[in-house]
Image: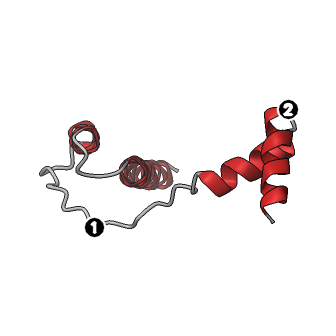
Amino acid sequence: MPELVEKAVEMALQGDTAALRICIDRCIPALKTVEQTVDVELIPNGEPREMSGRILNRMYHGEIDPETAHKMINAIARKISIDELAVLYERLDALEEQWSKAS
């Protein structure tokens, strides 16, 4: 068995990318995201820029990992999209109501 390992390392050192991948996969474990609960101080009236800034600041200081920060900022962005869509629907309803009264 040690001969196989030596051969794989030798092939990797000679430029065999498949052998290199095998060696790397065995020597360096894949990173795994650890789920974590984060207490985020939400800002009244939901100022997204400030909330995102707080999240990035916590990530910068190592309080939360980059994957969690990414998910949190995506959640804020989706909330903004949902809120904007709701406003558009309200405006459309108001326009339709005005249109029907004018007809």
Image side of residue 45 versus residue 2, left or right: left
Q: Quadrant of the N terminus?
A: bottom right
- Residue name at image x 67 percent, y 57 percent: 26
Q: Position of residue 43 (x, y in %)?
A: 14, 50
Residue 84 or residue 80, whichever sits in front? 80
Which residue sits furthest front? Answer: 3
Q: For numbered disc 1, what is the local secondary structure? A: loop
Residue drawn 25% across and 45% down?
A: 62
- Sequence-wise, which precedes: disc 1 or disc 2? 2
What amino acid is at disc 2?
Gln
Nearest to the observer: residue 59 or residue 26: 26
Whether tag 1 and tag 2 are in contact, CB under 8 A, the answer is no
Identified by mark 1, the residue type is Thr
Checking the image for residue 14, the label placed there is: 2
Front-lying residue, 54 or 63: 63
Kindly report the distance in space between the C-alpha atoms of the residues bearing marks 1 and 2.
46 Å
Compared with 64, 15 (above or below) is above
Label 2 environment density (alpha carbons within 10 Å; few <14, some 14–19, many ≥20): few
Q: Residue at x 21, y 49 (%)?
A: 46
Residue position for label 1: 37
Depth order, front residue of 13/30 = 13
